[in-house]
Structure formats: C-alpha cells, structure tokens
C-alpha cells in the first residue's frame, strides 16, 4: 500500500475502496500487509462492510476514494486472467485451518473447479470435508480468494455465501475467459 495507511490514535487503519468487480461493484479493504477483506457492494453497504470488517479483524477502517495504482492494477489483472500471484493477502484473524483452506483455493486455476473433498485432501485433512465448507463460508476475501471454484463431489455447485446466482456467474465468466 506504500505507506498511505492512516492512523487513529496511533493505530493503523485499513482502507476500503469500491472498485468494479467481475459481477458488480466490490468493496476491498487493504493495508500494508495486503488485501484484508472484500464483499459485493450491491449486497452490502459501506457501513455494513466496515462494521463486519472491524468485527472480524478488530481494526478500524476508513473509506478511500481510490486505492494505490499498483494494487488496483494487480486486482484488475487477477480479474482478467484469474492469476492471483501478484496479490498479497492479510489473513490475520483466520485460524491456521481456515488459512490453509483459503490458500489452497488460490491454487485452483481460473475456469477449473475442485471439490470440497479435493480441497480437504490438498490440505492433508481428507476427513475434514464439512470443515472445509465452513472455512470457505468464512472466506473474508471472496472473488479474490476464489472459493466459488469449489463444488460438491456430485458436480453440483454447493453453497455460496453470496448466493448461487453469483457463484454461477463467476464460474461462467471464468469458463468463457479460459476458453478464449
């Protein structure tokens, strides 16, 4: 974030900007450690996202009119290619298990899906399929950490915290882009 983080009473403040996402506006919280949160702007107001972000992280946040160009460019690149390598994430507050699940999601290529069972095996916890689903439901950075790429073993989509229509749109968009 290049040192633009504000401080309140000496405490760093996460910044929140609204950007165009692949299926509508996206709130993105970020700080010097990386991207710390995201949510769909058409489903949550700024005030609600800010409150939930504080409840999850314990950190204050403030609205930013524009994020740093390098971060914006890296996010845009990830939307266009599905490649998240240029992004850094601030996953503080997640349990070690949750973080392992979210990191495993990052390895799923755009246009591809893995099952909850595949993800459980990837993190060396093959019997933790339901816990994997719970960790995905708690993903603080949806879309950018692509939990939408995880489906049920029977091929059905399973659940998505923001609703199945959004999960379908994200997967369809990625399938079209990866086929091109």
Image (cartoon, grey):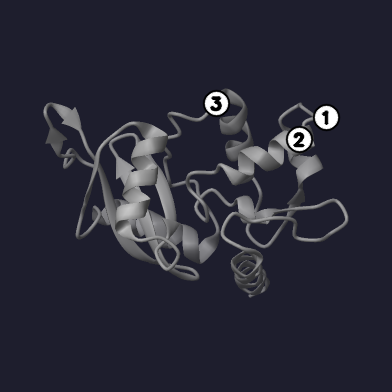
For label 2, the SS is helix
Q: Quadrant of the C terminus?
A: bottom right
Q: Local crowd at mark 1 within 10 Å, few (<14), some, or many (≥20)? A: few
Front-most of residues 89 and 11: 11
- For disc 1, the marked residue is 127
Q: Which mark is residue 56?
A: none
Q: How many discs appear?
A: 3
**Which numbered disc, 1 or 2, marks the residue that appears first in the sequence?**
2
**Which numbered disc, 3 or 2, marks the residue that appears first in the sequence?**
3
Note whether 88 is above or below 39 in the view shown.
above
Give left or right: position of 94 versus 170. left
- Mark pair 1, 2: CA separation: 7 Å
- Residue 157 falls in image quadrant: bottom right
Note whether 3 is above or below 168 in the view shown.
above
- For disc 2, the marked residue is 120
Kindly check if marks 1 and 3 are in contact, taking CB atoms under 8 A apart as contact: no
- Residue pictured at 15% horizontal, 39% vertical: 6
> How far from the left and from the top, in percent, is residue 32?
28, 36
Q: Local crowd at mark 3 within 10 Å, few (<14), some, or many (≥20)? A: few
Q: Which mark is residue 95?
A: 3
For label 1, the SS is loop
- Mark pair 1, 3: CA separation: 18 Å
- Mark pair 3, 2: CA separation: 15 Å
Residue found farthest to the left: 9
Of circles 1 and 2, the one toward us is 1
Kindly check if marks 1 and 2 are in contact, taking CB atoms under 8 A apart as contact: yes
- Residue pictured at 24% horizontal, 52% vertical: 68
């Amino acid at each position: 974030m290049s040192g633009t983080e504000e401080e309140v009473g000496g405490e760093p403040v996460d910044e929140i900007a609204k950007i165009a996402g692949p299926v509508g506006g996206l709130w993105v919280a970020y700080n010097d450690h990386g991207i710390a949160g995201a949510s769909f702007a058409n489903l949550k107001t700024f005030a609600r996202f800010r409150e939930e972000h504080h409840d999850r992280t314990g950190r204050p946040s403030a609205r930013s009119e524009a994020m740093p160009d390098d971060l914006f460019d890296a996010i845009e690149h990830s939307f266009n290619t599905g490649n998240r390598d240029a992004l850094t994430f601030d996953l503080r507050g997640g349990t070690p298990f949750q973080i392992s699940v979210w990191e495993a999601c990052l390895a799923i290529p755009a246009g591809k899906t893995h099952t909850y069972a595949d993800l459980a095996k990837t993190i060396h916890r093959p019997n933790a399929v339901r816990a994997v689903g719970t960790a995905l439901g708690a993903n603080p950075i949806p879309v950018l950490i692509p939990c939408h790429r995880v489906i049920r073993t029977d091929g059905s989509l399973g659940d998505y915290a923001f609703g199945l229509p959004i999960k379908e749109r994200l997967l369809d968009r990625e399938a079209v882009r990866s086929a091109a």
